[in-house]
Amino acid sequence: MAGLSGILYLNRKSLNNTKPELDMMLDKISYRGLCKKHISEVKGCNNGYIGLISNYDINKTGEKYKIFLDGKIYNLDYLLNKHSINANKKNLTDILKIELLFEKILVGIFKDFEGPFVLIIVDRAGNFFISRDYLGRKPLYYSLDKKQNKISFASELKALDPFLDKSEVFILKPGKFIKNGDEPKYFKQLDLNYFKNKESTSKTETIKKVDSLLTNAVKKRLSAYKGKILGVWLSGGLDSSLIAAILKKYLDNIITFSVGFENSPDLLASKTVANYIGSKHIEYKLKTDEIFNLIPEAIYTLESFDAPLVRSSIGNMIVSRLSSKADIVFSGEGGDEVFAGYNYFLDFNNDEEIQKELLKALKSLHNTALQRVDRFANKYSVDVKLPLLDEELIYFSFNIPPAFKINKNMTKYILREVALKYLPENIVWRTKDKFWEGSGINEKLKNKIDKIISDEEFNKNSKIANNFKLRNKEEMYYFEIFRKFFPKSNYNNIISFTEDFN
């Protein structure tokens, strides 16, 4: 867990004293790293400061580069071997491994890194490179002040918004990197090339392969956590239940965490799964007034007013708080996007439509569901792992014929077949609910907000930009709160909206 901020003046020899401003930016996101803080000066063709706040010991620099990392790159040793870089890997930190790889391959190495990361590298001449993993599991915002020839960046919008002055803020899109003040460029991009090699294996072999890849994805994320407290955010749906069951194969003591209204479908299903796999189960029962009162805090933390996203974020906030004592927590996020889990996939008539929609869903994750997971996990210092978004698993899955994913009027069919090995049938074949539906949040919030905003007010004020209209009263309520927290940010550049809107 870490948070990044920086202020750099481009192609300027003199160094402005931006350190106090950078300190304030880091303070805004201090919960992303409660233990360690490091601010490094950049000199050369670009001048300024870069700050990192982390829960772990900070490697201030490599030997030749200044390197700042939010996240984890899982395949560094493999890449050192692949590129014939001789090194005593046991004595090298991840930072030094990154340095050796970058020194030899330069920006070409970014596409080979596996894992969630935002990575900043500064060479001795003052050139800097900022890259973000191709799924966007870690966040990075930036603003360009052309008048001052300055770039500012941070892990979260709240660190930038107070300091914006006639400069726009943007998201660094997944799979892109920035060199100095140049336009961001792709080093790796999700596109239809992911589908060009259809797997020709049988359904039986595909089930075995998915099982193996998912098991390896879980084990990969466990390697450094032996003897630690491990948990799972358990919704009672297929994805989180399967992750919990696989994890329980390798560890006797895991804790499962669930939230929902009393007798809600998610809470009942979660208890069924916990009893079946034998986990220590902790559940939290929601109350209407409680979730309504949490809305402003949820919006400030989340940095969005997309109604379905805010709605699901409240449950995410509570389960993050509930699981904050665990050393790492596993989530089933990503299963719907990788294995065609949403009910609207049943409406498509051919393979090409399904593949395009899968690609679209996966590309939207970075500032919808993954934004939610990142913000609330960091808010409560939860180190969250997402094995269903493992690169090897994604690549294999996206080349599975769509008929293996959608079959017999059932979504995520192949993953359900895998789950039969681990879970009871009533969980395996349970139909898909949005989190806010299964937990009972949706109806409670809608009923309350409909009484606050009149039809007349909604019709009069729902249009907030030339081409944008708030979709219902709930979203209007969230938007008004968002603008109070982030008055300077242009939401057109930074917010995406959940299309499958209830």
Image (tube, grey):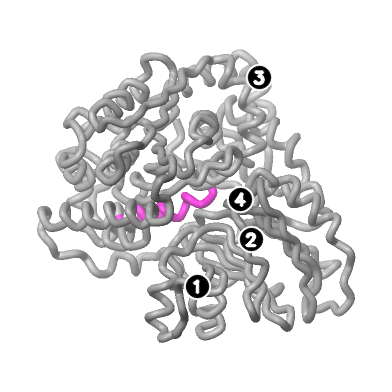
Q: Which residue is mark 1?
A: 91
| Secondary structure under the numbered disc 2 in the rendered image | loop
Residue 339 vertical placement versus 241 (above, below): below
Residue type marked 3: Glu
Q: Please tell me whether the stretch drawn in magenta is mainly helix, strand or loop.
A: helix
Q: Which portion, as a residue range, is magenta?
A: 355-367
Q: Nearer the viewer, mark 1 or mark 3?
A: 1
Q: Residues within 10 Å of mark 1 (few under 14, many from 20)?
A: few
Q: Nearer the viewer, mark 3 or mark 2?
A: 2
Q: Pointer 2 and pointer 1: residues touching (CB < 8 Å)?
A: no
The image quadrant that residue 360 belongs to is: bottom left
Residue 55's mark? 4
Residue type marked 1: Asn
Residue 58's mark? 2
Q: CA distance from mark 1 to mark 3?
A: 67 Å
Residue at the spot 58% in from the left edge and 26% down from the top edge: 474
Q: CA distance from mark 4 to mark 3?
A: 49 Å
Q: Pointer 4 and pointer 3: residues touching (CB < 8 Å)?
A: no
Q: Which residue is mark 3?
A: 456
| Secondary structure under the numbered disc 4 in the rendered image | loop
